[in-house]
Amino acid sequence: MAPAKTPITIAYGDGIGPEIMKATLAILDAAGAALDLEVIEIGRRIYEAGHPSGIEEKSWDSLRRTKVFLKAPITTPQGGGYKSLNVTIRKTLGLYANVRPCVAYHPFVDTKFPTMDLVIVRENEEDTYAGIEYRQSDDVAQCLKLITRPGSEKICRYAFEYARSHKRRKLSLFIKDNIMKLTDGLFHKVFDEIGEQYPDLPRDSWIVDIGAARLADTPEIFDILVMPNLYGDIMSDIAAHICGSVGLGGSANIGDHVAMFEAIHGSAPDIAGRDIANPSGLLLSAVLMLNHIDQFEAATKVHNAWLKTIEDGIHTGDIYDPQKSTKRVGTDEFTAAVIERLGRKPQVLKAVDYVSHHEGLDQDERPRTTRPRAKKDLVGVDVFLDWHHGAPAELVEIIQNKVQTDDLRLVSVANRGVKVWPGGAAETMRVDHWCCRFLAIDKTSPIISHQQVIDLLQKFQNAGLDFIKTEHLCNFDGKPGYSG
Ligand code: NAD
């Protein structure tokens, strides 16, 4: 009996998208993948028809119904007003994990790092990508970096589970918690907490700058790299480039409900319609998809046939090298070569076997962490001012004379994160953005109320000072939850 077909949503995209999707689907079909395709249209035409995110309302229904999306690259039109389709899809559907294998195909594809074989697991929703930005004064714009405990737990748990199911050897965290002690510090803490539950998997951590240098220099020391969104965005492009296979890279964006699979390259409008595009990035994304939907046999068949094609030196123009390749082919001929090799295995490159060694992840089986909420005490407030009338001492004088209340005392003033009062250095550059920190005067009872903050702000207003933002200073289980 033929296996039940899995419904998936596909989009042909723009530029080379239709050519490489057609090639990929032909190979999947020939390999016996049991798929029931729903086609949606995304990208340039949809943007230009007035949909600012490049996707129509009705397409969401298909994605929610099939829960699996194989997406070809799209072209984002030039000019203002257009939103990134990828960011919209990731955020709307909660695709929190971006998984990007970076593998060298030495000696068949040119690379400086013949043994490189790593996977980047990048948090996909939080960090500076939450898109929360403000212009606060004439001089200053701000972007909020959000790292959450549940978000960090999800991505770290995913990474450890991925490592276990894919039989990987270790996980390395890239982080900058020597500077961002609370945000990156939280991510690091959660990575260690979750890691404790996987004693079979060694783990280490790297400050992202030295980690990036080692990644660019000796990538073979890494296996799985885990990181917050911004570092992951940068590192995954570096890793894809140095393994020599940017045109071959596939990626998965995984959520609790929906998963999206796509090549890492763009729509390459410069070569569209010329039968020269390499379909490998989308095809390897489709292999990740077949594993995700438990079609292990088809995944194995497609991946091995592709490896054999690469090994036989049948290469599209982007990776063609007269020293290493035997034949330069176009998209259609490459596709036919892969189909011809279905059922065969590579001899030099390592063959895959997803059937006896499943790489699917059952998301629901992953344990969740539960913990009691911390005791939270409000102990002070930072009031940020837009003020450009003089030196710190003049501002302090106004605050001490007109603002300070009987309950709350000004303890410091900072500018761009540098303390300028008390003390301060003449060399420090200052802008029109001041952080005035207030703590309770009564040290024996340091907890303050929201009403005391409101009274303080009322006095700022009476003094004609332009307060632009407040941040409450809280202790959590007695430990300060603020920097400085
Ligand atoms: P690109 O990846 O499309 O192209 C960069 C270079 O690589 C070009 O020279 C191109 O010809 C070549 N190339 C890319 N894929 C190839 C393939 N499969 N085979 C052979 N050669 C290939 O990047 P770009 O030029 O910066 O962007 C073009 C468009 O793609 C832009 O509109 C951009 O917004 C969009 N884009 C979309 C996605 C996506 O949909 N996920 C990702 C990145 C860029």
Image (cartoon, grey):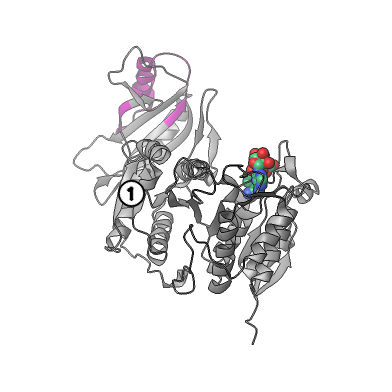
Query: Residue 446: within the magenta?
Result: no
Q: Which residues are magenta?
A: 384-412
Query: Ligand 1 falls in which quarter?
Result: top right
Check the image and report above or below for 470 versus 4: above
The residue lying at 68 percent from left, 70 percent from top is 30
**x, y percentage for residue 276?**
72, 47
| Depth check, front residue: 172 or 107 | 107
Residue under circle 1? 188
In the rendered image, the residue lying farthest to the bottom is: 1
| Depth check, front residue: 306 or 418 | 306
Check the image and report above or below for 484 versus 352: above
Check disc 1 and give the amino acid type.
His
**x, y percentage for residue 412?**
31, 27
The residue lying at 46 percent from left, 51 percent from top is 122
Check the image and report above or below for 116 versus 469: below
**x, y percentage for residue 235?**
47, 42
Asked if residue 307 can be seen in this view, the reply is: yes
The residue lying at 49 percent from left, 57 percent from top is 349
In the rendered image, the residue lying farthest to the left is: 444
The residue lying at 35 percent from left, 18 percent from top is 397
Q: Is residue 95 left or right of residue 182?
A: right
**x, y percentage for residue 452?**
36, 40
Asked if residue 83 can be seen in this view, the reply is: no
Which secondary structure, mark 1? helix
Quadrant location, the N terminus? bottom right
Query: Residue 408: within the magenta?
Result: yes
- Disc 1 residue crowd, few under 14, some 14–19, many 20+, Cα 10 Å: many
| Depth check, front residue: 143 or 453 | 143
